[in-house]
Amino acid sequence: GSIGSLVMAVIVNDNDAEPSGRGNQPKNRRLWGMVVCHHTTPRAVPFSLRSACEFLMQVFGLQLNMEIELAAQMREKHILRTQTLLCDMLLRDAPIGIVTQSPNIMDLVKCDGAALYYGKKFWLLGTTPTEAQIKDLADWLLDVHRDSTGLSTESLADAGFPGAAALGDAVCGMAAVKITPRDYLFWFRSHTAKEIKWGGAKHNPDDKDDGKKMHPRSSFKAFLEVVKWRSSPWEDVEMDAVHSLQLILRGSFQDIDDSESKTMIHHRLNDLNLHGMDELSTVANEMVRLMETATAPILAVDSSGFINGWNGKAAELTGLPLEDAMNKSLVRDLVVDESVSTVERLLYLALQGEEERNVEIKLKTFGTQADKGPVILVVNACASRNITANVVGVCFVGQDVTGEKVVMDKFTRIQGDYRTIVQSPNPLIPPIFGSDEFGYCSEWNPAMVKLSGWKMEEVLGKMNVGEIFGSEMACCRLRGQDAMTKFMIVLNSAMGGQDSDRFPLGFFDRQGKYVEALLIANKRTDGAGAITGVFCFLHIASAEVQQALQVQKRSARTALDKLKEVAYMRQEIRNPLYGIMFTRRLLEGTNLSEEQKQIIDTSAVCEKQLHQILDEDNFENLDHGNIDLDTIEFTMGTVMDAVISQGMIRSREKGLQLIRETPVDIKNMRLYGDQLRLQQVLADFLTTAVRFTSSSDGWVGIKVVPTMKGLGGGLHVMRFDYRISHPGKGIPEDLVQQMFDCSREITQEGMGLSVSRKLVRLMNGDVSYIREAGVCYFLVNVEFPLADRDDSQN
């Protein structure tokens, strides 16, 4: 038997894992298999050889993972292609066409047989149970799983089907979906052992099992007995395809008469950074008003994918009010299953700064809209940015094309009698024009007349490319030769059978006004299926969205100017700061007294504090308190000197006396912590107290009260209570509310106090503002470990 073994795992990505919705999350990994090297005697494998073997397994796992992902992509493409063909069959012969024509439902997922049970009739394909057994299966599903819309299992016996034994090993696994309250689609699989082949050593009749070991072939036979009554598992991508076909079939039994107006959202929301607090308030209010009153659905999510914006149109279409939509997950709660991967990709790219346009997604409906099915939107994904140009969320501006899809579905079913749709004066019908097989205009509906200004009799019979849409002398002039070439390619592709979806088309109407639209080109066929022309549908952006786009462009320009001003100010502040640093270093080299050296040291730590503020490149993290603190050794006396020096000039200008109460024994006490952040917050609270103290009050004080706490083992922590007090009425209550983030509007002083409070909390401290009779004060509590260890207690 084996005495020494070397076992190496082959690890691949787990493609069946639940997606996280965040692009920077690592993929889940799973064990694919193992490579085991046996030795009949004890043996120690050298480290270098083990490392080489592990590297070999990593390379093999990487190559294997690429093959698995490629196979998964090919399988998904095959499923989507088959699904498209099945949908086309449903439009002509629903639902029988998916089993009587080719390809059929067996081509959708890997299976040994499939069946349709519809209207008490049976259509069987491949290896299936008998009609009576399928009837028993349907009755069992209706009885035991009546509340479910389907069932998938690897073993009907394990699932509890009473007739599983009668089916034998020819039918073990089943996937079933309900298409009407009493009708089902079935897919069947045989046992796993049918697909598993022996891949070990050649058969040797002399090899026998004994009491100590089992021969590999005997072990393999035992394994086959275990899996004999089970099929291979149903993969997630296969079940997604099955559920998508289920939704399509259930939708084909509904009579949908609703048709809504179409609006096209053709814009890009750039960085929402505005110039100054006043302009921010004005433009923000205007943007909110436009979003709430827009006829286009607009929704927004934060960086984690949770809803933080939901306008009235989105609530109207989905039946979900604003208060219920807020803080829901867009991917998990609001998007239908078939659009999950699309929305995840949109979110990932937008959070990386890559904005996609004209992407179709489907949202769930709720309440009174639940019976109408999902809402179909064509959206633009726009990255929302803060003042430092960092992406903090995603905004989706969409157009409702549900009605247009209904129109197209009806048009496909009607085939010969399409004029009731094309020539209808109903304002809900979108602009439509057509082309015959030679490229001449064959249709020009009333909506197209209203959009372009050209009457139907003026354009019928003219060439769509060149005479109607073209350059110079054309009716609807395009912007340049490239635009005309692309338009011609779209029409020719549709004539070749390749439909074009959401192609951007811009042209000048009869009055010279530029019109932006999305073009959908579909082939037109006769009764025999031969292509006889092209139908083109246009979608136009609403006036509200165009106005919002103009406001956004102005906001982007002012935000860019603001960023340039901030960058200029930072650079210009650094130059004199370097001069101050150079002068200080020159003074350090001279013969200074102890008092002069202390002043120079105070100047140095103030310079470092200013450097740290100028180097702050992510204000959002600072505002949220998400920064890393430094841990250095410092003395409390140095900190207090720097804080007092920053408040001295302003207090002297107002004739105020700064009163400092610091115990002598803590001035040279050495501590561990972020000295510069402590200076920053104490100086901010001190200067705020000076700013709101009148000259007649006469003084502002800062008092430090230390308390030592023992941790054991000779270690101690010092707790410091800083009391920054001043007489009079104190700072305004609104400013106090801004410090605690309880006010909707915020000033520069309030922002500084808020950031300082968050920095104190980040240092495991707390801040409060207390009003007493005749005096008010900031109370700041922080703790720092002592740098000196008391070994006498150890």
Image (cartoon, rainbow, N blue to C red):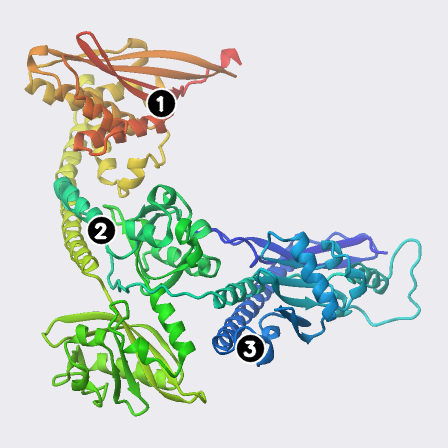
Q: Amino acid at mark 2?
A: Thr
Q: CA distance from mark 1 to mark 3?
A: 71 Å
Q: Looking at the image, is mark 2 or mark 1 earlier in the sequence? A: 2
* Residue 195 rendering spot, x and y as whole percentages: 73, 69
* Residue 196 rendering spot, x and y as whole percentages: 74, 68
* Residue 61 rendering spot, x and y as whole percentages: 60, 62
Q: Quadrant of residue 698?
A: top left
In this figure, which residue is indicated by the disc labeled 2? 293
Q: Amino acid at mark 1?
A: Gly
Q: Looking at the image, is mark 2 or mark 3 earlier in the sequence? A: 3
In this figure, which residue is indicated by the disc labeled 3? 97
In this figure, which residue is indicated by the disc labeled 1? 765
Q: Nearer the viewer, residue 536 or 271?
A: 536
Q: Amino acid at mark 3?
A: Gly
Residue shown at the point (55%, 73%) measured from the top left: 95
Q: Along the horizontal axis of the image, is 310 left or right of 116?
A: left
Q: Nearer the viewer, residue 81 or 226?
A: 81
* Residue 326 rendering spot, x and y as whole percentages: 36, 43
Q: Along the horizontal axis of the image, is 522 left or right of 204?
A: left
Q: Residues within 10 Å of mark 2 (few under 14, many from 20)?
A: some
